[in-house]
Image: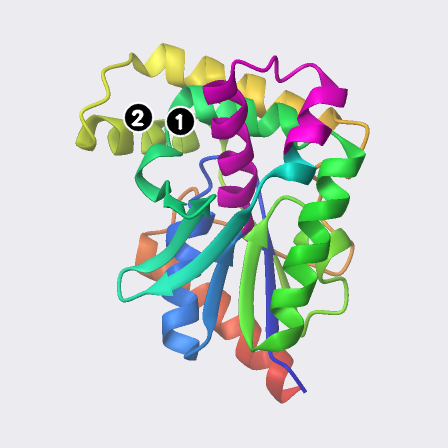
Amino acid sequence: MRLNVAIDGPVGAGKSTVADAVAKRLGILHLDTGAMYRALGLAALRAGIDTGDEEKIVGLCRGLKIAVSYEADGQHTFIENEDVTGLIRTPEVSMAASTVSRYAEVRKEMVRIQQRLAAETDMLVDGRDICTTVLPYAAAKIFLTADQEERARRRYLEMREKGMNDSFENVLAELKKRDEQDMNRPVEPLRRAPDAELVDSTSLTFDETVDAILRIVEAKRNG
């Protein structure tokens, strides 16, 4: 039986970095599904397509080749064989990803790819609807979160390290806007699955967060 671990949570909760560390400790692959939506958002911005135009976004998604591969430094995301891993973490792409992820046909296509990948190998998958939609029967399901100010602080520091100049106030405002959009979209909104274990990392260090999730996974495997 495949070991599938599902992690959901809001923007800025540190899902990607925490999930990557957990997957390494477990010796399994890590699929960052958010990167797939970010790739579509980037493609839309490049093509000058209004992300609010559902018909055009769905058409773009159906004709776009989005793929992932695993290198020594983690997951790489590709659009039409171009590695866009380093291009999809800007605030503009984040908001575009949040918008395009609202569309049912886009999510259906992405979920199909994600479920196929998870069925092929032991894998940790993180995103917004993994516990509820993509892997509802995962061996372990976790909802990773932190309060908004702490998530905004982490995102602000991360952006500063990458040379992105923005104020904390703007980062917090964008995070609140993203939360509102993710939690209130009509298709598969962000929510905690009833059987997902809550991990609130507001007052936890990175290593403490990783250890908390590993304890949950081990308990589920041994239970």
Residues rendered magenta in the picture? 33-60
Residue for point 32% across, 60% down: 207
Location of residue 220 in the rendering, given as x and y in whole percent from the top left corner: 63, 78
Residue for point 27% across, 66% down: 72
Residue 113 on the magenta segment = no
* Residue 156 badge: 2
Location of residue 143 in the rendering, given as x and y in whole percent from the top left corner: 61, 52
Tell me the quarter of the picture where residue 199 sits. bottom right
Residue 161 appears left or right of 11: left
**Residue picked out by circle 1:** 152
Q: Is residue 202 above or below residue 213?
A: above
The main secondary structure of the magenta stretch is helix
Q: Closer to the camera, 182 or 219?
A: 182
Q: Secondary structure at mark 1?
A: helix
* Residue 16 badge: none
Tell me the quarter of the picture where residue 6 sits. bottom right
Residue 58 appears left or right of 219: right
The answer to whether residue 201 of the structure is visible from this angle is no
Q: Are marks 2 and 1 in contact (CB under 8 Å)?
A: yes
